[in-house]
Amino acid sequence: MKSPPPLPAIQGALLAPELAQLAGAGKTHEYRKGTMLISEGDEGDTLFVILSGRVKVFANDSHDREVTYGVYGPGNYFGEMSIDGGPRSASVITLEPTVCAVVTKRALREFMLAHPEFSFHLLTTVIHRARQSTRIARSLALDDVYSRLVQFLDSHSRPQPDGTQLIPERITHQEIASRIGASREMVSRILKDLETGGYLAMQEHRLVLLGKLPERW
């Protein structure tokens, strides 16, 4: 895959010096696209620091429907929820060739003792992701598919000089469906209707919002 397009700023990303210090506490590994780094329910006591590439954090329900909790790139880390010794709370797969520094629980503890300010960063990240998971659960329970899709498009778009809103990430209908907890067929149908209605367009495989999306579909 070609190098990914610019991503929106991701909550909790580490600055370069902090990233280098934390990565230095672990061992660097290279992974191919489609590699399952973490499986939900497994035991684990390692933290992954993303040096390059992208990963998807997701879970499947009893009907094998997928819900995506987040997509993370360089400067982020994942696996922090199992540091307490509990099972992994979600699965993580690489979306493209990815390089991670894998930090053991012991190494992480020593790093935090030497860099106490990181403890606050870790706590902030855990709180943010817990809130994000709560919002996703609430949306799945209370909102219809169209409302969830609009929320996704609005939150991932960036204003352009011409007044439109661009979603910088090249994303498939299936990926959108996974992130909002819907079927690909339903997402494709809604997007096609919005495109026909003149509300959005495709430019170089990226979605562009041409105006305010209707409240109802």
Image (cartoon, rainbow, N blue to C red):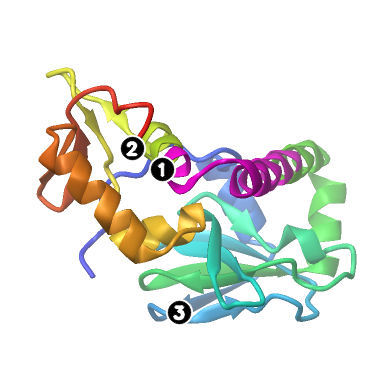
User: Disc 3 versus disc 1: distance between alpha carbons?
Assistant: 35 Å
Label 3, secondary structure: give it: strand
Residue 13 screen position, x and y as percent: 55, 42
Q: Where is residue 205 in the image (x, y as percent from the top left)?
A: 15, 53
Tell me which amino acid carries mark 1: Tyr
Q: Looking at the image, do the residues carrying marks 1 and 2 touch, with CB atoms under 8 Å apart?
A: yes
- Identify the mark at residue 31; answer none if there is no mark: 3
Residue 83 percent coordinates (x, y): 83, 63
In this orientation, which residue lies closer to the viewer: 124 or 174?
Answer: 174
Q: Nearer the viewer, mark 3 or mark 1?
A: 1
Residue drawn at x 56%, y 38% is 11
Q: Which labelled disc corresponds to residue 60?
A: none
Q: Would you place residue 141 above or below residue 38 in this image?
A: above
Residue type at tag 2 = Trp
Label 1 belongs to which residue? 146
Q: How crowded is mark 3: few (under 14 residues within 10 Å), some or many (20 or more)?
A: some
Q: Which of marks 1 and 2 is in front?
A: 2
Q: Residue 217 carries which label?
A: 2
Q: Is residue 4 visible?
A: no
Magenta part of the protein: which range?
Answer: 127-148
Camera-near label (2 vs 3) is: 2
The answer to if 6 sits in the magenta stretch is: no
Is residue 171 or residue 34 the one in the foreground? 171
| Mark with earlier residue (2, 3) | 3
Q: What element carries label 2?
A: loop
